[in-house]
């Protein structure tokens, strides 16, 4: 199981993780790259800043605007579906 798979499984179970947690729990040298690879794979990963300033990644629901942009890109032939 890859680091990306482990992080995705944690997100899918409802966990919110900081960059430091992704590094320490899953051994990711570059946690931002792990998150970026999940986003490029189509997963809606969001970064939320808490009141205390802590930033946590979570899996969310894509906005209508993002979904619309994806459909437009497919229709224009910019990406393959």
Image: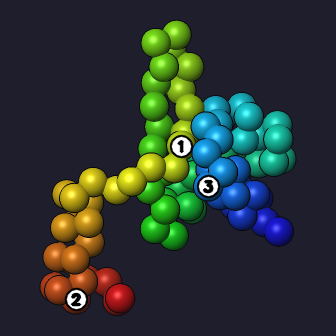
To which residue does mark 1 refer? 58
Within 10 Å of the Cα at label 2, are there few (<14), some (14-19), or many (20+) other Cα atoms? few
Q: CA distance from mark 2 to mark 3?
A: 31 Å
Nearer-N-terminus badge (1/2): 1
The residue singled out by tag 3 in the image is: 12
- Point out the tag, 3 or 1, that comes first from the N-terminus: 3
Count residues near mark 3 (Cα–Cα under 10 Å), then give few for <14, some for 14-19, many for 20+: few
Q: What residue is at 52 percent from the left and 10 percent from the top?
A: 52
Task: Say if mark 2 contacts mark 3, CB within 8 Å.
Answer: no
Please, what secondary structure does the residue beneath circle 1 have?
strand
- The residue singled out by tag 2 in the image is 77
x 61%, y 37%: residue: 16
In the displayed structure, would residue 45 be above or below residue 16?
below
Of the 4 image quadrants, the one containing the C terminus is: bottom left
At 26% from the left edge and 72% from the top edge, which residue is drawn?
70
Tag count in the figure?
A: 3
Please tell me how crowded label 1 is: few (under 14), some (14-19), or many (20+) other residues with Cα within 10 Å.
Answer: many
Residue 12 percent across, percent down from the top left: 61, 55
Expressed as whole percent of the image width and height from the top left, the position of residue 60 reads 45, 49
């Amino acid at each position: 199981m890859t680091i990306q798979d482990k992080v995705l499984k944690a997100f899918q179970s409802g966990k919110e993780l900081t960059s430091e947690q992704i590094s320490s729990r899953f051994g990711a040298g570059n946690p931002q790259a792990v998150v970026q690879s999940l986003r490029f794979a189509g997963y809606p990963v969001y970064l939320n800043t808490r009141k205390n300033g802590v930033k946590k990644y979570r899996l969310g629901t894509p906005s209508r605007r993002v979904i619309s942009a994806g459909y437009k890109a497919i229709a224009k032939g910019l990406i393959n579906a």
